Image (cartoon, helix red, strand yellow):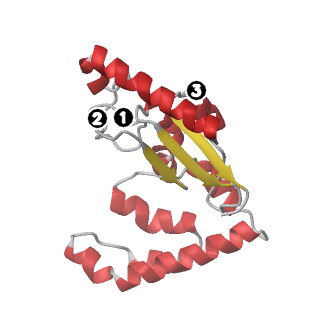
Amino acid sequence: LAEADNGLYTRMDQQQQQQQQAPDAAAEGLGAPAADSSSRGQAPAAAGLRGSGLIGAALVSPPVCLHSTNNKMGKPMSMKFMYNLAVAYKLREYVKEHRAAFQALGMNIDTQAMLNSWTVSSFDDAVTLRLLGYPAPHHYYRHACSTNYIPHIRTPTLILLSRDDPFLGMLPKEQVTANPFTLLATTRRG
């Protein structure tokens, strides 16, 4: 871990030197490609973001790849599927409890479709996609995957994941390894 910390600090020092030498390039995200951050279902939405002002960040259990997560949690007769059912139940309860608040904000929820949602995927179809304005699940899943954003991170960032997390669809080893501003740490159990 000390080596990783040293590498992280070295990268941070390099970033600070680059920002001092070319402040305009640093403010533009050090060459991150432009993209329309307002269009839903298109990733990454990193364009238009200016420097975060942070000297470091830590992500704990971020959604890595929702396509992969959805596939793994959708396999019947597995512990992940049981977890899927439990999470969907809690989501339904949460929306029922806060239905009035959603309606007061102008967010109409199809109550019957929500009550018929027994998995996270069916809940996404009935509620999440409608509330967030996505036309289809694959648009939402693609847009919410951190693998789309990792290449554009320019703040030293630790990504902490547990290998037994039911929502972990994959480890973003390739994306993290390719970005000198990111460091991946995993635990066997979370």
Q: Residue at x 65, y 44 (%)?
A: 171
Q: Residue at x 25, y 20 (%)?
A: 23
Disc 2 is placed on an element classified as: loop
Q: Is residue 74 above or below residue 19?
A: below
Quarter holding the N terminus is top right
Provide residue 16's location: percent of width, then percent of height.
36, 25
Dot 3 amino acid type: Ala
Mark 3 in CB contact with mark 1 (< 8 angstroms): no
Disc 3 is placed on an element classified as: helix
Q: Is residue 83 left or right of residue 52?
A: right
In this figure, which residue is indicated by the disc labeled 2?
49
In this figure, which residue is indicated by the disc labeled 1?
46
Mark 1 in CB contact with mark 2 (< 8 angstroms): yes
Callout 2 crowding tier (Cα within 10 Å): few <14, some 14–19, many ≥20: few
Q: Is residue 152 above or below residue 58?
A: above
Pick the residue in front: 33 or 22: 22
